[in-house]
C-alpha cells in the first residue's frame, strides 16, 4: 500500500493526529507531555509538524481510539510508539495497546528517552519487553553535563538513569539501539558509540533537524 494512500487514512478527528504514517510504519502519537525539554525538539521551537503531520494534541487518546486509528496493523512494517512526547508517561495505555497488537503478530517499537523507571519509581523494563519488540533510546550525549545542557531534564540524575534503564532493559531483550544527534554542540558521537559498545547495544547516529 502506498504511503500516499496511508496518509489519507490518518485519524484526524477533532483536528488531532493520533497515528501517522512514514517509511511503511505506523507511528502512534499518544501524548505531547515530556520528561525532557530538549532544545532541539521541534515543539519547544513552536513547530508541531513532522513530515506534514501536525502532532499537537488537545486531549490524549485512550487505548480504543489508538487501536481504531491504527486499524489493520498487519499492513505496516512496524507500529512505533513515537510522537511529539514521551509515550512511557502513559505506560498503562501503551502496554494495553501493545498487548492487543501483539495478538496480531506485528512488530512493535518504542522510541523513548529511557526515563520510564525514574518516572514510575520502579523497574518497568520487563513489562515493556514482554510486549514490545524493539527499543530506540535517546542517549543524546556522552556525558551528563552535555546531556543536561541540550535535554534540560526535569529530574535530577536523569543521564545516569538513562544508562541504568538501558542496562536493566538489556537483561530482557537484545533489540536495543541508542541514538545521539550529530550536529549538537559539544556532543562526541564517537564517545556515544563507545558507550553503546560498553552496554552491548547498537548505536545509531541521527542528524540534527532531520525529524521523522
Image (cartoon, helix red, strand yellow):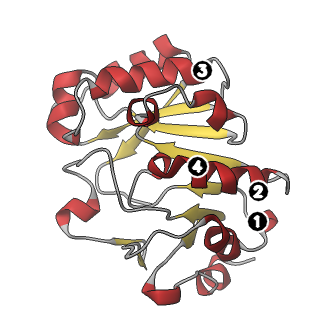
Precedes in sequence: disc 4 or disc 2: 4
Camera-side residue: 121 or 176? 121
The residue at the point 73 percent across, 64 percent down is 76
Is 77 positioned to the left or the right of 122 in the image? right
Q: Secondary structure at mark 2?
A: helix
Q: CA distance from mark 1 to mark 2?
A: 7 Å
Q: CA distance from mark 3 to mark 1?
A: 27 Å
Q: CA distance from mark 3 to mark 2?
A: 23 Å
Q: CA distance from mark 4 to mark 2?
A: 14 Å
Q: Secondary structure at mark 3?
A: helix
Determine which residue is flagged by label 4: 92
Determine which residue is flagged by label 2: 101
Determine which residue is flagged by label 1: 73
- Indicate the position of residue 145 as horizontal and vertical percent values: 16, 24
Q: Nearer the viewer, mark 1 or mark 2?
A: 2
Quarter of the image for residue 46 reads: bottom left
Q: Characterize the local packing of mark 2: few (<14), some (14-19) or many (20 or more) Cα atoms within 10 angstroms.
A: many
The answer to whether marks 4 and 1 mark residues whose Cβ atoms lie closer than 8 Å is no
The residue at the point 24 percent across, 33 percent down is 155
The residue at the point 67 percent across, 26 percent down is 173
Determine which residue is flagged by label 3: 170
Amino acid at each position: 500500500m502506498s504511503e500516499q494512500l496511508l496518509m489519507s487514512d490518518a485519524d484526524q478527528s477533532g483536528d488531532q493526529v493520533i497515528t501517522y504514517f512514514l517509511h511503511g510504519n505506523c507511528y502512534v502519537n499518544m501524548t505531547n507531555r515530556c520528561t525532557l525539554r530538549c532544545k532541539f525538539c521541534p515543539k519547544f521551537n513552536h513547530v508541531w509538524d513532522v513530515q506534514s503531520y501536525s502532532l499537537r494534541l488537545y486531549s490524549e487518546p485512550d487505548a480504543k481510539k489508538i487501536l481504531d486509528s491504527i486499524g489493520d496493523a498487519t499492513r505496516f512494517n512496524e507500529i512505533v510508539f513515537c510522537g511529539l512526547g514521551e509515550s512511557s508517561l502513559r505506560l498503562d495505555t501503551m502496554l494495553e495497546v501493545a498487548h492487543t497488537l501483539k495478538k496480531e503478530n506485528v512488530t512493535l517499537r518504542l522510541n523513548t528517552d529511557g526515563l520510564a523507571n525514574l518516572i514510575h519509581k520502579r523497574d518497568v523494563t520487563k513489562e515493556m519487553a514482554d510486549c514490545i519488540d524493539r527499543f530506540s533510546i535517546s542517549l543524546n550525549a556522552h556525558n551528563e553535563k552535555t546531556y543536561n545542557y541540550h535535554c534540560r531534564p526535569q529530574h535530577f540524575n536523569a543521564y545516569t538513569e538513562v544508562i541504568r534503564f538501558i542496562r536493566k532493559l538489556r537483561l530482557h531483550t537484545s533489540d536495543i539501539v541508542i541514538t545521539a544527534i550529530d550536529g549538537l554542540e559539544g556532543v562526541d558521537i564517537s564517545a556515544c558509540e563507545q558507550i553503546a559498545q560498553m552496554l552491548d547495544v547498537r548505536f545509531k547516529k541521527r542528524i540534527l533537524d532531520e525529524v521523522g
